[in-house]
């Protein structure tokens, strides 16, 4: 490999990028736009659940419990006079949750046998589980306050049993003490954005040379296939790193996501994963020699799996075994796991290093495949 030729080819590619403003927009502006749009738009948290409160009697106990629901930011309540009216509103999708305190609720609570009726619109099972958890949290807090005041017996939570031996459960949230899905989603979102931008940018560079008829001219020069690929990889690698840096700064400053792991390992993971995404795009570009097809294959082969099969949103332990196996064949799965560890919990350096080794192998493999595809096409 000749260093002078490589520098000349790299300079040529940089000039090409400077003339094509769309590349700079995709490389610098698109990552920021995506992380802001998806960071604010993607959320597993449910706020202002439309709730119908059916209260069969007016007592200090029911009034206090109703005030708990009305004062919570998680519920948007409306008081109703009957169960039938509440069910009608639920069928019309005007409310998603019914909380019912029947007549005699206070007397039953004094005997420790109060029943709070909770009906959830459960077409979306995940949302239904979250709403049910919110109700249980209100009851737990309400019961704790009654115990502090000496008002016994306390109300039990949903499907709860009486506490044995006066034992109280004290919960503590680790690694996401803000209790927001944003902290969980944004680190993985950074990897998804790197996948899209990296593979999308390089999927056009070799194919563009073929379509413009300049590739045959390059191939008759002393430049080797390796030098041509490296000259196209280096500028886009720099663009990708700038995009990742901007995304990381956005995550820390705007979304307040902490960085608790090794900054060195985080940087290494970003570097190697960016190399894989760029090499994957180069491979497609060299293989199909058509910009449109290469772009489509890049989206299908990298971005969509990174969104759906990598554990970005859904834990791979909750899917069928064969789907999990497919997910673990893809580099985004290991990158997302490492980035989440390095941002949110820290530690687990052995796991991060293992993932880094796997990503390095994938990056080297696809770069070698791109080199072989270009050599075969040029033969």
Image: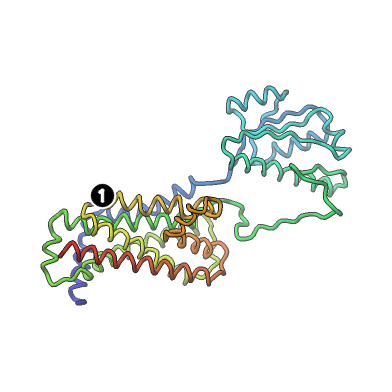
* Residue 60 or residue 343, whichever sits in front: 343
* Residue 40 or residue 160, whichever sits in front: 160
Quadrant of the image containing the N terminus? bottom left
The image position of residue 31, as x and y in percent, is: 38, 54
288 left or right, relative to 341? left
Tell me how many marks there are. 1
Question: Does residue 249 appear in this view?
Answer: no
Residue at the spot 88% in from the left edge and 38% down from the top edge? 110
Q: Secondary structure at mark 1?
A: helix
The image position of residue 292, as x and y in percent, is: 25, 48
Residue 187, placed above or below residue 110: below
The image position of residue 315, as x and y in percent, is: 54, 53
Residue at the spot 77% in from the left edge and 45% down from the top edge? 160
Residue 370, placed above or below residue 162: below
Please, which residue is most extreme toward the front here? 322
Residue at the spot 70% in from the left edge and 41% down from the top edge? 135
Quadrant of the image containing the C terminus? bottom left
């Amino acid at each position: 490999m000749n260093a002078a030729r490589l520098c000349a080819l790299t300079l040529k590619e940089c000039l090409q990028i400077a003339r094509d403003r769309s590349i700079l927009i995709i490389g610098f502006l698109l990552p920021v736009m995506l992380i802001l749009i998806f960071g604010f738009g993607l959320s597993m948290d449910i706020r202002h659940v439309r709730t119908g409160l059916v209260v069969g009697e007016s007592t200090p106990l029911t009034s206090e419990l109703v005030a708990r629901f009305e004062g919570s930011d998680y519920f948007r309540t409306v008081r109703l006079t009957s169960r039938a009216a509440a069910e009608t509103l639920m069928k019309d999708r005007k409310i998603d949750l019914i909380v019912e305190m029947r007549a005699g609720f206070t007397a039953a609570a004094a005997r420790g046998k109060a029943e709070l009726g909770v009906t959830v619109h459960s077409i979306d099972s995940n949302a239904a589980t979250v709403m049910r958890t919110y109700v249980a949290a209100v009851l737990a807090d309400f019961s704790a306050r009654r115990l502090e005041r000496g008002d016994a017996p306390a109300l039990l939570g949903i499907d709860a049993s009486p506490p044995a031996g006066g034992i109280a459960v004290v919960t503590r949230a680790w690694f996401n003490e803000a209790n927001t899905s944003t902290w969980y989603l944004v680190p993985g979102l950074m990897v998804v954005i790197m996948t899209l931008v990296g593979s999308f940018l390089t999927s056009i560079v070799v194919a563009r040379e073929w379509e413009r008829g300049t590739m045959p001219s390059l191939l008759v020069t002393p430049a080797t296939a390796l030098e041509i690929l490296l000259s196209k990889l280096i500028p886009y690698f720099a663009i990708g790193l700038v995009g990742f840096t901007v995304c990381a700064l956005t995550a820390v400053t705007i979304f307040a996501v902490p960085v608790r792991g090794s900054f060195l390992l985080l940087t290494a993971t970003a570097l190697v994963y960016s190399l894989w995404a760029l090499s994957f795009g180069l491979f497609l570009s060299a293989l199909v020699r058509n910009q449109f097809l290469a772009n489509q294959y890049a989206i299908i082969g990298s971005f969509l799996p990174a969104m759906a099969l990598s554990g970005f949103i859904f834990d791979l332990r909750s899917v069928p075994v064969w789907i999990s196996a497919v997910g673990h064949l893809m580099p985004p799965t290991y990158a997302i796991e490492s980035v989440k560890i390095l941002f949110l919990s820290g530690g687990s350096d052995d796991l991060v290093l293992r993932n880094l080794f796997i990503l390095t192998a994938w990056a080297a493999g696809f770069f070698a495949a791109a080199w072989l595809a270009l050599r075969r096409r040029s033969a």
